[in-house]
Each structure stands twice: as C-alpha cells, then as structure tokens.
C-alpha cells in the first residue's frame, strides 16, 4: 500500500552500473523530498536470471499500473534471440515521443551555454520496419527495401507534444525539421501537420522550419539559434546524438520516452560493464532523467532545484567523477548534491 500523498512510480535498477547510479539518484530525490513511492522491479540480466525474460510480466504490469518509470541501463544479451527491451517498451506502451534535452553542464567544451531540447517521433517514419529484400539472379539480397510511414495523426500528436512541452517549460520557439522538398509524402505529411498545430500556438510560441541537412549544419555553426526541435523518427535519432555531442557526448545525456498512458525516463548511456561495481560511475545522466520525470509529473520546482544543485556541485564545489576529470566516487558526488539540496543552495 502506498502513502496516498505520494506518486507511485516503477523503478528498474538495471544492469552493470545501474544499481550504483540508481542508489545515488534515490539518495538525492529523497533529500529533495520528491514524493515518489517506488515500486522496484527487475529488468535486463536480473529479469533473465529470475525468469528468462529481460522484461518480465510483473515489470510491465507495474509500469502499466503506475504510468511512470525510472529505468537504469539494461544490458542487451548477445545471442539468445532477445528483442531489444527498449523497442518492446516503446511498442507495448505506445511511447510516441522521445525527449532528448542537451544542456551544457561543465564549461570548457567545444560549445558554451547550449540549452536545446529535441523531440523525436518514436513510433512511425522509417522505423516501422516494413523491410525486405528483392532477389535478383543468384543474389537473394540484390535489393534492400524499406517503407516509411508517417501519419497526419501521429505527426500532429508529436508536434503538439513539442509545443505543450515548450509552453510548460517556458521556452520560446519550436523548429519543425523535415525533408519535404524530396520526401514529399513521407515528411510532407509531418510538415503540413506541424504547420497546422503551430497556428494554435501563434503569439505564444514562435515556430520555424528547417530542412534536416541544413539543420545539421546550423546546429554545428550556430546551435544557439535553436530552442525546441521536433522531427520524425530517423532524423530525430541522428540529430539527438548530434546535440549530445555539442554538450560533450552521451555521458550526461538524459532521455524520456513518453506515451499517452505511460512515460519512461532513463540515461542515454548503457550499463558500462567496464566500470561496474567500482563505485566510480557518474550518475548525472540518470539524475537529469529523474529531473525530466519531475517535470513530467508537474513537480517543476523540484526539477529546477535538482538541476541547480547539480550545476552548483559541478561548477562551484567542483566535485566531479572521473569521467569529468574529477576524483569523486559516485557516492561522494551524490552526497555533495544532497548537501546542496538540504542547505537550500
Ligand atoms: P556504455 O554507454 O555502457 O559505455 C560506453 C563507455 O562510456 C564505457 O567506457 C563506459 O565506462 C562509459 N560510461 C557510460 N556511462 C557512464 C557513466 N554513467 N559514468 C562514467 N562512465 C560511463 O555503452 P556500451 O559499452 O556500448 O554498452 C554496454 C551495454 O549497455 C550493452 O549491453 C548495451 O546493449 C547496453 N546499453 C543499454 C542502453 C539502455 O538501456 N538504454 C543504452 C545503451 C547501451
């Protein structure tokens, strides 16, 4: 039974460094007074060990019940024919939006003061996987064939999500990224739907458009001109890693997968088996993912407090883990954030 004032949420510690960074995140969220009642569930190798499935039924039931989950990285077993857990979750819960913010944490990288959000459509486009080969002569794979599908309804939904996110977080502009000059049907549908939705936000949120190739160049030449970017599945996949590169790589990149009835938050990095169990992993990406979860649950003050504390610890206290050039352990770093949170900064 849960305390009725608390928000029930599923927590999957995950594999490798997962349990270490999840402990750090729980320490910080407790200090913040984040009102989550955690329902701890298995996934990944722990799920396989317990019942032969990296995504056990009890875990799926828990996410369905709670509609909210924080997930540690899961090791994808090599061989054994397991389908990707992330793809299964996306399909199972129709997680149509992938949210990938990129924010400069520590100065001294190639770019300063980056603060971007990329919203990627997660269920349509060229990822629907209507794929096959056409044989020719002796070659059974002479031609590779793929079909992309974008629907007006799916496009409107993702663009509306991007605008609503912009409104909620007080952002100023949404950029529609497409390739409608060439893929006239596939991405034309997205662009038209996007323009229709943009009209509803006129006067509140600015809207502009970019062709994806030009956008990639402009992100490198002048990323500060962008604010929220919304795009189709494949373009979003590529551009989200590009913007992670602008702020120093995947190490501190959080992500969220959002549907109508469920939302799952995670770090973009994997289970880092090379450093697992050493207590030196950087929990920042998972902490930032927890920040997105706080935003999503409407706890924006908690989310802001968390981000401020991370910034203060990294840049004023200069407590950093080894991947950021420091010497702090995972726990040292988490305790420094707790210190900032409890002292009111
Ligand atoms: P990885 O992200 O786990 O590691 C890449 C490198 O980055 C390693 O050197 C690692 O030590 C370092 N690193 C990653 N996270 C770090 C952190 N928080 N602090 C300090 N250093 C960190 O990628 P990989 O090695 O290619 O993948 C390992 C496993 O993770 C694979 O089984 C893969 O399938 C899985 N994976 C899972 C997810 C997910 O669950 N979302 C995402 C990516 C990879």
Image (spheres, rainbow, N blue to C red):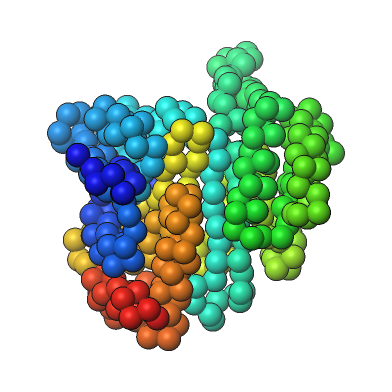
Q: Position of residue 76 (x, y in %)?
A: 32, 40
Q: Position of residue 321 (x, y in %)?
A: 33, 74
Corner quadrant of residue 264:
top left
Q: Is residue 232 left or right of 103 when viewed as pictured?
A: right
Check the image and name the residue furthest to the left: 50
Write the residue at 81% across / 43% down.
199
Quadrant for ligand 1?
bottom left
Total number of numbered discs in the rendering? 0
Q: Position of residue 8 (x, y in %)?
A: 31, 43
Write the residue at 41% across / 48% down.
265
Q: Is residue 281 left or right of 204 when viewed as pictured?
A: left
Rendered-image quadrant of the N terminus = top left
The answer to whether residue 148 is above or below residue 22 is above
The answer to whether residue 105 is above or below residue 20 is below
The answer to whether residue 216 is above or below residue 189 is below
Write the residue at 20% across / 29% down.
52
């Amino acid at each position: 039974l849960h305390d009725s004032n608390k928000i029930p949420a599923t927590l999957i510690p995950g594999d490798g460094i997962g349990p270490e960074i999840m402990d750090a995140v729980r320490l910080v969220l407790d200090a913040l007074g984040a009102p989550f009642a955690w329902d701890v569930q298995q996934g990944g190798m722990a799920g396989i060990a317990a019942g032969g499935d990296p995504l056990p039924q009890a875990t799926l039931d828990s996410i369905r019940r709670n509609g909210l989950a924080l997930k540690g990285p899961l090791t994808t077993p090599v061989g054994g024919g397991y389908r990707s857990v992330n793809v299964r979750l996306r399909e199972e819960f129709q997680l149509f939006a992938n949210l990938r913010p990129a924010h400069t944490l520590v100065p001294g990288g190639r770019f300063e003061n980056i603060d971007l959000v990329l919203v990627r459509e997660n269920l349509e486009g060229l990822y629907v996987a209507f794929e096959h080969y056409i044989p020719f002569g002796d070659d059974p794979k002479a031609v590779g064939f793929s079909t992309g599908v974008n629907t007006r309804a799916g496009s409107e939904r993702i663009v509306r999500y991007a605008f609503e996110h912009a409104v909620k977080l007080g952002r100023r502009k949404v950029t529609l990224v497409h390739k409608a000059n060439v893929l006239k049907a596939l991405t034309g549908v997205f662009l038209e739907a996007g323009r229709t939705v943009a009209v509803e936000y006129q006067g509140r949120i600015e809207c502009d458009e970019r062709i994806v190739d030009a956008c990639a160049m402009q992100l490198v030449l002048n990323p500060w001109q962008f604010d929220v970017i919304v795009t189709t599945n494949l373009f979003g996949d590529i551009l989200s890693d590009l913007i992670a590169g602008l702020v120093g790589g995947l190490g501190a990149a959080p992500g969220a997968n959002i549907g109508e009835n469920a939302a799952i938050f995670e770090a973009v990095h994997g289970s880092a088996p090379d450093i697992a169990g050493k207590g030196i992993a950087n929990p920042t990406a998972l902490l930032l993912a927890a920040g997105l979860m706080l935003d999503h649950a409407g706890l924006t003050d908690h989310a802001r407090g968390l981000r401020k504390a991370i910034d203060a610890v990294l840049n004023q206290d200069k407590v950093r883990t080894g991947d950021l050039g420091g010497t702090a352990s995972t726990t040292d770093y988490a305790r420094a954030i707790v210190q900032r949170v409890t002292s009111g900064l």
